[in-house]
Image: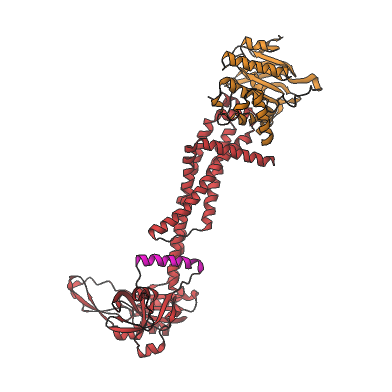
Amino acid sequence: MIMFFRFKRTVKLGIKTLWMHKLRSTLTMLGIIFGVSSVIAMLAIGEGASRDAQERISRLGSRNIIIKTIKPQEESSVGQQQMLQEYGLTYDDAERFQNSIPNVRVIVPNRRLAQQAQYRTRRVSIEVIGTVPWYTDISTVRVKFGRFICSEDMHYKRGICIVDEKVVKELFGFDDPLGQNIKIATDYYRVVGIATEESEVTAAANNFEAKEQESAKKGGAKLGGVYIPLTTAKNRFGEMSLQISAGSSQTIERVELQEIIVQTKDVDLVLGTRQSVQSLLARFHKKNDYEIIVPLELMKQAKELQRIFTIVLGSIAAISLLVGGIGIMNIMLATVSERTREIGIRRALGARKIDIIRQFLAETLLLTFLGGILGMVIGLVIPYMVQYFTKMPTAITPNSLFLAFGISAIVGIAFGLYPAYRAANMDPIESLRHE
Amino acid sequence: MIQNAHQPNNDSNGRILEFENLCKSYWLGTTELPVLRNINVRINRGEYVAIMGPSGSGKSTLLNMIGCLDRPTSGKYFLGDKEVSKLDDNQLSLIRGKEIGFVFQSFNLISQLNIIENIEVPMFYQGVSEHNSNARAIELAKMVGLGERVRHKPTELSGGQQQRVAIARALSNDPLLILADEPTGNLDSKSGADILNILDKLHEQGKTLIVVTHDEQIAEHARRQIHLFDGQIALDKIN
């Protein structure tokens, strides 16, 4: 009980002393405030960025291997420009994957074309995705209303399409898209379904994804998607495209497939299958006209990157806390020597060394705790501002709060003890004489 | 007026303090510099003693010794029934707070505390509860005639008033002895006379007082004078 009241009075005395030197106390606290808030804010930004990356990657599917067509580097022999350029993934490739690679669960060949879609008088840029009925098995695309492509569509090369939510919003406004016809290039397609992209990551990220999509809408970066049967795409768009490049030279390009997605039976088989895919492609493709994307590897890289990011940001913030702590120690040492006489008086009036230590330690701890709390508040506000102004996702983790507060408490004790110890060990006779 | 005044001690005829062959030396490099040599003094309960002597006579050192701020090189120092020279720093601190009431030449009040809080400081370190110490501080402030100014800061008071606060503070733990070091040294003659009056009254109430001074007139107030010269007691007389 006595201990408690003493503690209370020591704290009261500390507050009083600090209040007398408001400016000095505030300036001293700033170091801790900035330190703590930067720890929290930096970790929140780092965490947000990594969740964002992991979210994007996980949407590609962790069991998938994605092979994309890329335009090969043009050979430096400029004079021999071919009129017809043939490159990229072929239906043969897809078949070879199907026949000769073990552990493949399913293969999805895709065509992807940038087009304009028209509904009544409205026109928007879209991406046409020519695909197969089982596309929904390997992606996070789900049908919300209506249906997806079926095998009859493939067989009869029907002119139907499934539009995603972005297209619905941009092209149809408040109209019901189901059963309507939209015009892409020269042909009409009947809308039979509405697709939505569903996140693989769970509830916590759902909220986050909503924000992310919101910001994407504002930025308008991603094109809306229209899914049509692969056979229809082959039939209606052909495989040739005319490219007009600089110097008004024209080339015709022939590309069969823009993308093949291979899904393995198990996550553990992904890396082995990647090897098989690579060697198979290397045998049949003379030009370097493809790239292999393994979301699982990307995920690992992203996690590793996140770890490094956290360490770097964390240590920068920790250094700023350290600097803040040194600032506190500096001020407390100055305070101790300034209050030498007071210390002498207190010693003469019966204060033990431990009493003096308590008094000065209480002041330092008050400064760091108050600074820590203010820093936490600011540290919680900064990520929101960053998110608001830069559209960069952030995520505050409870761990970062504990970490920041713990560090500020440790800083307070570590940097408060020495000045307090110095104060307690001054000779009372000398301190009483001190002017 | 003061509560709990000490009853005469049965033991050793009310001895408050006693020095036995007390010596104190300082070291300047390898040279020993004796400051106090073979001091033998005994002061009893209720005495009013003036310690006098020119500067360099060892007055201040003796004062520090009596006030338990310093330890003798050799010899014994009894305060009440305790032998102080054997105590460690913690115990010395507690004894200073409990048994000695300091009154300094330059008042030595703590400037950020108000009068009540200043008077409470020694009680705080003795673990007196806030409620009790506050009541006693108010009572003591009234006694020294500052009852209506208790919330003022020391800087808002005159020198004489500050010294009265210091006396109230010295009395707060009801110590064995009041130890005053040139209590009127920084005061004008009228305030000084006031302070001496208060000390006289305390003496009448049975307090034990030791005043260190070089002023003959102040020493006249005391009932006993001890003169120091060159670290030794040159004269010990009853007025």
Give the magenta range.
Answer: A203-220
Q: Is residue B1 magenta?
A: no
How far from the left and from the top, in percent, is residue A370? Answer: 53, 45
How far from the left and from the top, in percent, is residue A104? Answer: 45, 81
Front position in the image: B227 or B172:
B172
* Chain coloured red: A
Residue furthest front as drawn: B148
* Chain coloured orange: B
Does residue A167 appear to the left or right of A254 in the view shown? Answer: right
Quarter of the image with the C terminus of chain B is top right
How far from the left and from the top, in percent, is residue A234? Answer: 32, 84
How far from the left and from the top, in percent, is residue B68? Answer: 67, 25
Residue A82 vs A54, above or below: the answer is below
Does residue A428 appear to the left or right of B48 in the view shown? Answer: left
Residue A99 vs A372, above or below: the answer is below
| Residue B70 seen in render | no
